[in-house]
Image (tube, grey):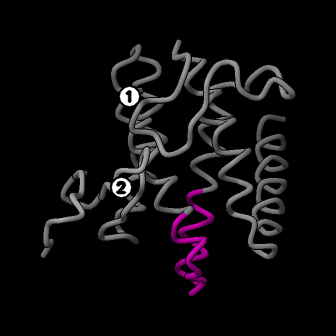
Amino acid sequence: MRTLIVSIHSQIEGLVFDIVSKMQTWELMGETVVPYCLRSVGLSVGMVRNDELAVYEWGSEDFSEFPGTFPLPIACRVLVNLLDYVLRSRKWGQTEQKLECFAANLMWDLSNLAVGLLMQSLEIRSFSVRLLLPTVFKSLRFFSSAKVLVNGAPYMISRHGADLLFPDMQYS
């Protein structure tokens, strides 16, 4: 029965992601589904708002029209599957700017989320290591580096770590 539920869940996700891809509504996903899932994860581990270095902002009072949260495993799987879908789309040659920006922002927040979850209980750390970190590492195979704007400040995540970018400096 559990296998059937997971299969149905995956099919629904695939359909939604296909629609978003065809309609080019990545911003909508970044304004709704992604913050809601991040909020679900955060609230499940006792956070009341996003980290200050998060691209996608959320707080415990957000989404009042959608009360409640997804369980931790479902919220994380939606985020991971979404990033996997974006990476597969990129591999297929769909490299539009909106998709690249969405992928970089999601990769940034998933990276921060994975590290944050490593500071939680053994069960949650294990979940982060089994589910989130492999996806983050896989995404770094597709992007040698990615730039994001966090609260107006440019940052870069790469295979070598994350850095604050200073606009007046030359980077090699």
For the view shown, which residue lies furthest in the bottom direction? 93
The answer to which of 12 and 102 lies nearer the viewer is: 102
Say what secondary structure mark 2 lies in: helix
Name the spot of residue 129 as percent of width and height, x first: 39, 36
Question: Where is the C terminus found, in terms of image quarters?
Answer: bottom left
Name the spot of residue 136 as percent of width and height, x first: 41, 52
In the rendered structure, which amino acid carries the disc numbered 2?
Answer: Phe
**Up/down of 84 relative to 30, above or below:** below
- 143 vs 86, left or right, is left
Q: Quadrant of residue 169?
A: bottom left
Q: Residue at x 24, y 61 (%)?
A: 159
Q: Which residues are magenta?
A: 83-101
Which residue is disc 1 drawn over?
Answer: 116
Name the spot of residue 140 as percent of width and height, x first: 35, 63
**Up/down of 131 relative to 19, above or below:** above
- 58 vs 159, left or right, is right
Query: Per the image, is 100 magenta?
Result: yes
Q: Residue at x 35, y 26 (%)?
A: 118
> Which sits earlier in the primary sequence, circle 1 or circle 2?
1
Q: Is residue 129 visible?
A: no
Specify the principal SS of the magenta part.
Answer: helix
Query: Per the image, is 11 magenta?
Result: no
Which residue is disc 2 drawn over?
Answer: 137
Q: Are marks 1 and 2 in contact (CB under 8 Å)?
A: no
Q: Residue at x 41, y 58 (%)?
A: 148
Q: Residue at x 22, y 52 (%)?
A: 163
**Up/down of 153 relative to 19, above or below:** above
